[in-house]
C-alpha cells in the first residue's frame, strides 16, 4: 500500500489486525513502485492531458497505456 492517509486510519488498522493481515507499505517516496505514478509520468511526457482535456480522451490514453 502507499502511505496515503486513507490507508493509515484506525478503522483500517483495526480491521487488518482482526483479520490477521499484515500491511506492507511502500517506501515514503517510490514512484517507480506505484503504477499510477508511472501512468502519470507517461501522460505528462506525452503532454496529452490539460485542465480542459475531455474525459473520453483521457480514458483513451489510459487504455492505450495498458495495451
Image (cartoon, rainbow, N blue to C red):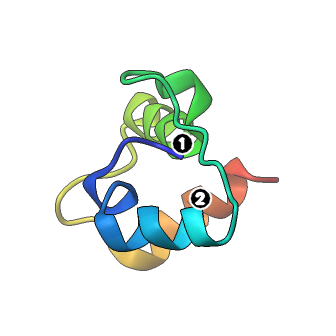
Quadrant of res 39: top right
Which residue is under mark 2? 62
Q: Position of residue 56 (x, y in %)?
A: 47, 78
Q: Nearer the viewer, residue 31 or 45?
A: 31
Q: Earlier in the sequence, mark 2 or mark 1?
A: 1
Quadrant of res 33: top right
User: Is disc 1 placed on a helix, strand or loop?
Assistant: helix
Q: Nearer the viewer, residue 11 or 35?
A: 11
Quadrant of res 54: bottom left
Q: Residue at x 36, y 74 (%)?
A: 11
For this view, does 6 lie left or right of residue 14? Answer: left
Which residue is under mark 1? 39
Q: Residue at x 38, y 35 (%)?
A: 44
For this view, does 57 lie left or right of residue 23? Answer: left
Q: Position of residue 57 (x, y in %)?
A: 47, 68
Q: For the image shown, how many numbered marks are present on the structure?
A: 2
Q: Position of residue 9 (x, y in %)?
A: 30, 62
Q: Are marks 2 and 1 in contact (CB under 8 Å)?
A: yes
Q: Residue at x 39, y 76 (%)?
A: 55
Label 1: how many Cα within 10 Å (few below 14, some 14–19, many 20+): some
| In the image, residue 14 above or below residue 4 | below
For this view, does 43 lie left or right of residue 47? Answer: right
Amino acid at each position: 500500500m502507499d502511505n496515503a492517509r486513507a490507508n493509515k486510519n484506525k478503522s483500517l488498522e483495526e480491521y487488518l489486525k482482526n483479520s490477521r493481515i499484515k500491511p506492507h507499505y511502500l517506501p515514503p517516496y517510490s514512484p517507480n513502485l506505484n503504477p499510477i505514478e508511472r501512468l502519470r509520468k507517461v501522460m505528462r511526457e506525452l503532454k496529452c492531458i490539460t485542465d480542459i482535456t475531455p474525459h473520453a480522451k483521457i480514458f483513451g490514453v489510459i487504455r492505450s497505456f495498458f495495451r
